[in-house]
Image (cartoon, helix red, strand yellow):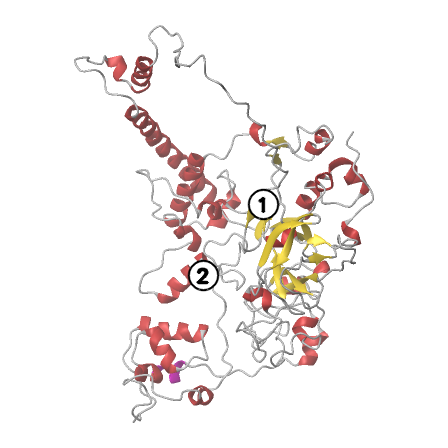
């Protein structure tokens, strides 16, 4: 039974670890003690670990137990110049710089510290009522316990073949191993730290947990799956050990070719090498070189990932002569599948993913059969289009097909992607040039390419502000608004609520006088209070400037669905010269006439 197996493994690992740990601690403490004076022979009692340590420490102290007094020679005639008190440093807030959003979810139920505890005007008593306990009242996570849990999980999975989700389901181990959309599992939290090197340890590298298996070095398909487990497959990320897309860690389905064999061959203008298939005619095109199974599967895998590549390119990937690859390529190349999804059937289905305020992206669907209620399709349940990483058929009627615009046409509502508040997809929108960044290409792909402007943070009329260092044109992306991705409970507990009742009790942001939260979609917000970038310093447009000129917003924030993720881009509303301060209209819902009564 999994329950008994998990219990037994956890008990055995803890027993082994504790036995080793006691000796390890004793040896480390003894290594800190000075050697006994020459001629002194330690007694049997002093040779014992803790007693020897205490004896050595006593020898280092004063014999009579009295405190030591350090005397300093001073000149009685010395003159001391009065020092002018330094002015107090202006108030500031710390915010960790980050290049992209980080997933926070919900804050812990433990309060790490009491904010503004030394300010009588802040009602901290009512604020702490939102938390279950103080962090200093509870035991912090024990690295030893986590080492024991990870070793037990590793043994259960490797030796007994118990999947990690089954281990979690037993509830035997104190902490959950796998991540969900609501929390980060212990495996993900341990991937970026060192592991304990103790005799009973069987974990050679944390990366074995990222992939959940150790691939054979000659099995390319397994190695690609392993890489996908470590490097996030989401195009917004592609980073190792991603902590945002916690569940997108599997190989995408094979891509279907968009070109026939003859079309691909017409793209080749010259031979790639002396061994290129173009150098000599073939007597028998149906013959195939003698390759082993691994070599054939390497080419098959390459075609699943890059089906429209030429034999010349595939030869480089497979480390094989081009003329041999050509013969196998003709045999393995899948037939071009005609897209039988018509616009009529595509538009007849209901979708809610065009309005971020009413929609939250779901994980890619993964089921057999059509995307319907009967197959419990996640996209169907969420009224969403199927995305590139969905495991359903490429002919699925729910799949987003991208736009058919030509270059520079995607800045109008005629672009189907822009009309649905999406950025163009580099693998679906093939004509608008969104795969390449720069002038003359698609302008509805600026967020994913990171085409931000250089911005300075310096003194403004309202404290710190954001100022352009280079000119911007209408529609240019100025910067992306980034911060912590938080759920509604954390949004409320941090005090970003416009309800008068909440303002009276716990509006931390209102007391501070600043809020850095933008609503992202129906369930998440972005808070750059504690982590963000220069975008958090863009001020609200208000009244007139010192010269008497009326101030108007020169930029605006838009939520865009970018390769499956909602992201916020701040775009120029008109041409802006270098040196101009960026100003946003925060909107009426951002402000409230109700002030907190903390007396």
Q: Which mark is residue 564?
A: none
Q: Is residue 529 left or right of residue 15?
A: right
Q: Position of residue 54 (x, y in %)?
A: 33, 16
Mark sitting earlier along the chain (2/1): 1
Q: Is residue 467 left or right of residue 267?
A: right
| Disc 1 target residue | 95
Q: Residue furthest top?
A: 64
Q: Position of residue 372 (x, y in %)?
A: 65, 67
Q: Could you say whether the residue bearing mark 2 is in a helix, strand or loop? A: helix
Q: Quadrant of residue 146?
A: top left
Residue for point 27% across, 79% down = 290
371 and 423: which is toward the camera: 423
| Residue 137 against residue 483 in the figure, above or below | above
Q: Quadrant of residue 329?
A: bottom left
Residue for point 67% across, 71% down = 418
Q: In this picture, which residue range is highlighted in magenta?
A: 328-332
Q: Position of residue 3 (x, y in %)?
A: 47, 42
| Residue 303 against residue 260 in the figure, above or below | above
| Disc 2 target residue | 228
């Amino acid at each position: 039974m999994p329950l008994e197996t998990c219990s037994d493994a956890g008990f055995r690992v803890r027993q082994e670890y504790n036995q080793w740990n006691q000796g390890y601690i004793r040896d480390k403490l003894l290594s800190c003690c000075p050697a006994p004076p020459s001629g002194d022979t330690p007694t049997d009692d002093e040779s014992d670990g803790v007693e020897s340590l205490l004896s050595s420490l006593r020898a280092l102290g004063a014999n009579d137990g009295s405190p030591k007094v350090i005397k300093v020679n001073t000149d009685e005639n010395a003159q001391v110049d009065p020092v002018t008190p330094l002015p107090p440093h202006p108030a500031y807030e710390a915010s960790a710089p980050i290049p992209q959003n980080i997933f926070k979810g919900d804050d812990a139920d433990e309060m790490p510290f009491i904010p503004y505890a030394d300010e009588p005007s802040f009602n901290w008593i009512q604020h702490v009522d939102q938390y279950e306990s103080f962090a200093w009242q509870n035991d912090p996570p024990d690295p030893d316990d986590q080492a024991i849990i990870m070793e037990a999980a590793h043994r259960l999975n490797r030796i007994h073949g118990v999947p990690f989700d089954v281990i979690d389901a037993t509830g035997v181990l104190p902490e959950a191993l796998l991540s969900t959309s609501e929390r980060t599992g212990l495996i993900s939290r341990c991937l970026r730290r060192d592991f304990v090197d103790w005799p009973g340890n069987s974990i050679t590298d944390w990366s074995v947990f990222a992939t959940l298996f150790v691939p054979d070095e000659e099995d390319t398909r397994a190695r690609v799956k392993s890489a996908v487990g470590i490097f996030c497959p989401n195009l917004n990320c592609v980073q190792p050990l991603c902590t945002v897309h916690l569940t997108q860690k599997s190989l995408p389905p094979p891509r279907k070719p968009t070109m026939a064999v003859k079309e691909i061959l017409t793209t080749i203008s010259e031979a790639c090498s002396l061994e290129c298939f173009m150098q000599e005619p073939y007597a028998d095109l149906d013959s195939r070189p003698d390759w082993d199974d691994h070599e054939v599967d390497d080419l098959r895998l390459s075609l699943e990932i890059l089906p429209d590549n030429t034999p010349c390119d595939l030869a480089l990937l497979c480390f094989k002569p081009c003329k041999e690859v050509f013969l196998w390529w003709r045999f393995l190349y899948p037939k071009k599948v005609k897209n039988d999804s018509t616009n009529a059937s595509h538009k007849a289905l209901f979708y809610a993913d065009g309005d971020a305020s009413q929609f939250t992206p779901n994980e890619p669907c993964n089921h057999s059969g059509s995307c319907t209620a009967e197959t419990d399709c996640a996209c169907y349940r969420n009224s969403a289009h199927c995305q590139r990483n969905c495991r359903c058929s490429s002919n699925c009627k729910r799949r987003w097909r991208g736009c058919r615009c030509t270059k520079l046409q995607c800045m109008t509502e005629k672009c189907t992607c822009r009309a649905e508040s999406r950025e163009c997809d580099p693998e679906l929108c093939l004509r608008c040039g969104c795969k390449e960044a720069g002038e003359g290409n698609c302008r509805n792909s600026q967020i994913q390419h990171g085409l931000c402007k250089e911005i300075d943070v310096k003194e403004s009329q309202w404290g710190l502000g954001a100022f352009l260092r280079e000119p911007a044109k209408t529609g240019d992306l100025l910067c992306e608004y980034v911060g912590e991705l938080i759920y509604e409970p954390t949004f409320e507990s941090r005090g970003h609520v416009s309800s008068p009742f909440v303002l009276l009790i716990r509006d931390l942001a209102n007391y501070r006088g600043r809020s850095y939260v933008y609503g992202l979609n129906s369930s998440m917000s972005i808070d750059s209070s504690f982590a963000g970038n220069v975008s958090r310093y863009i001020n609200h447009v208000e009244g007139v400037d010192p010269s008497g000129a009326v101030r108007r917003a020169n930029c605006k924030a838009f939520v865009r669905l970018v390769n499956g993720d909602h992201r916020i881009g701040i775009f120029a509303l008109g041409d802006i010269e270098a040196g101009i301060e960026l100003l946003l209209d925060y909107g009426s819902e951002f402000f409230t006439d109700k002030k907190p009564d903390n007396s």
